[in-house]
Amino acid sequence: MEAAMGLMRRMPPRHSETALSALLSLLPQHSSDLLSQVDLPLQVLCDVDNGKEFILCEYNRDADSYRSPWSNKYHPPLEDGPYPSSELRKLEIEANDIFAIYRDQYYEGGISSVYMWEDDNEGFVACFLIKKDGSKTGHGRRGCLEEGAWDAIHVIEVGPEEEGTTRYCLTSTVMLSLTTDDESSGSFSLSGSLRRQMNMKLSVADGHLCNMGKMIEEMEGKLRNSLDQVYFGKTREMVCTLRPPAEVAQMRLPDS
Amino acid sequence: MISIFVFSLFPSLSCFTNQKAFTDHYLLLHISLSLSFSSAFLLFLVPNKSKRFRFFPLKFALQRARKIGMAEEETELSEEQRKEIAKWFLLNAPAGEIQYVAKDLKSVLNDDDVYNEAVSEAFPVYNKSHMICLEMPGRFGDVLVTSYGELQDNEYLDPKTAQVAIVDHVKQVCTEVRPATDEELPSPYIEEYRCALDIEMSKYVGEAYPKGFCSVYCTNGKDVEGPGSDFELVVVISAARLSPQNFCNGSWRSIWNIEFKDDIQILELKGKLQVGAHYFEEGNVQLDARHECKDSTLFQSPDDSAVSIATIIRHHETEYLASLEVAFNMSGLFQMLEFSRVLY
């Protein structure tokens, strides 16, 4: 299983779906682990009841149907799918509405969904998802075709309440993909994902959604900075190391 | 239980009129929310009939796994299919990482026969496509493994030293070296052009690429004796920066095809540049950038042609590097990432 995750870390991110299918067929006995640990770019379905879109992931899925957070129904319909308890469902509805506001403020568009379910340890798990498609239709500064997609998955495991505090464990994954295809400069594709974790013990006085919201806000800020450093910083550094720009060509770089 | 119903009414009373950021919103609602939470916790602590939802994620994960398992029994993968999958993984390994991919693959496949077959088929293709650079024993320097220099499955010509390297693809080493025969080398006329270009290119690559290697091969017309016929040379530049301890690897590959058109006394150049980078600390980020370009110049003496060609190549590659800088500064990404109201 470790070897499988190692392979996923090396395969080109734009082929991650193919890589995952390949691993699932080679390691069927590990399929539940693989499906829950490997993140793929998020897909979206439209809720037939109210026309709103919702995000698909393993956490709202049963067999081949997905549960919409807006209507709490499975698409395509399922007789016997699992549902969160009614209390949790109320919380889930709150979370969806509030998260939609957050998403609109920070991303000015995009789609968000929140799914919750009880877990074995008397706590619950909440999954916050955001999908934003940043592709332009020819309005880019250089007038070239640009495609961009941001997918964020935040899974928070909420522990049981202990003396007024609760432990929250947040695992966040952000997947970013940027492609340009241009007459003069050829094709440029930069894509990939970063994953971070954060653990906090917070008082329940402010309520779960407030705590979870704070954690996610902080985490997204950190991830945005990492993306700047990693996506652009490291890859640009690598290109300049391979072939330094003309000004530094005179100096020989030391061997690493 | 009645209290739970009462408490659960509170969230529905809240109105989302407040347009402030996430955290502010919660402070206003926290009273109603904390009440519904405490009721939710009561639910967890008190055993009840709805326990079947406790195993929520596990239940559907098992269902899915069972479905896949059933599918597996119906259509077990053939050895051939497993081999093809294994090859796919190997061929898609980033520069300098095929050995790591092979190690993980061996563990995943758990079948040495399929593994060995896949490896013996995939490694040569990978090595040639990445134009790996191997050291030749006997102080002959390095040889590039490319399809242009391939004489046989594991024999590669190094035109600079007129030696043929025998290569073990899977171990990625050069095991022995032998001199090239006359049939394997171009004619003296062609060799003049090839050698002059090789010298100029080596100068350029030595200056521009800290860890780059280049080779010049004749891909067409190697037996041309004198003026009056067309021929083709190819310049191959391969540079790799491997830093696995920093979780970062990268490669630059250039292939320049040069057609020497004797009748119109013109040289036509076609370049293909490919840059790749992979960063994998706490994630997996990869760059894949490609570019094609064309140019032409006059057909001159070997030395003058070589200087002309090297100048053109240097110009295009420098320009491409500059356009990559622009791509990295793309405003598009920052607009997308722009968090409008909060500054970090």
Image (cartoon, rainbow, N blue to C red):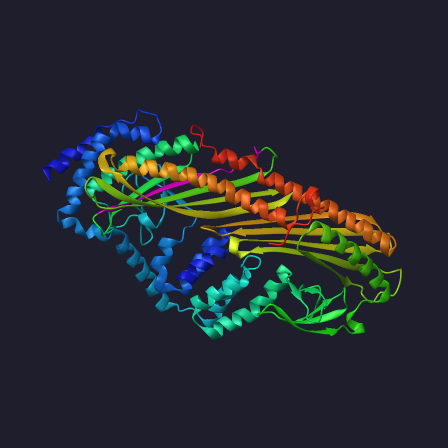
Give the side of residue B82 with respect to residue A201, left or right: right
Q: How many numbered discs sit on the rendered protein?
A: 0
In percent of the image, x 86 and y 52: which residue is there? Answer: B304
Q: Quadrant of residue B322?
A: top right
Q: Position of residue B211 (x, y in %)?
A: 66, 55
The vertical placement of B302 against A98, above or below, is below
Q: Position of residue B239 (x, y in %)?
A: 65, 55
Q: Is residue A184 visible?
A: no
The vertical placement of A101 against B213, above or below, is above
In percent of the image, x 25 and y 33: which residue is there? Answer: A206
Q: Position of residue A178 (x, y in %)?
A: 53, 43
Q: Which residues are magenta?
A: A123-140
Q: Nearer the viewer, residue B60 or A65?
A: B60
Q: Is residue A133 magenta?
A: yes
Q: Is residue B261 visible?
A: yes
Q: Position of residue A119 (x, y in %)?
A: 24, 50
| Quadrant of the frame with the N terminus of chain B | top left
Give the side of residue B165 with respect to residue A102, left or right: right
The vertical placement of A69 against B135, above or below, is above
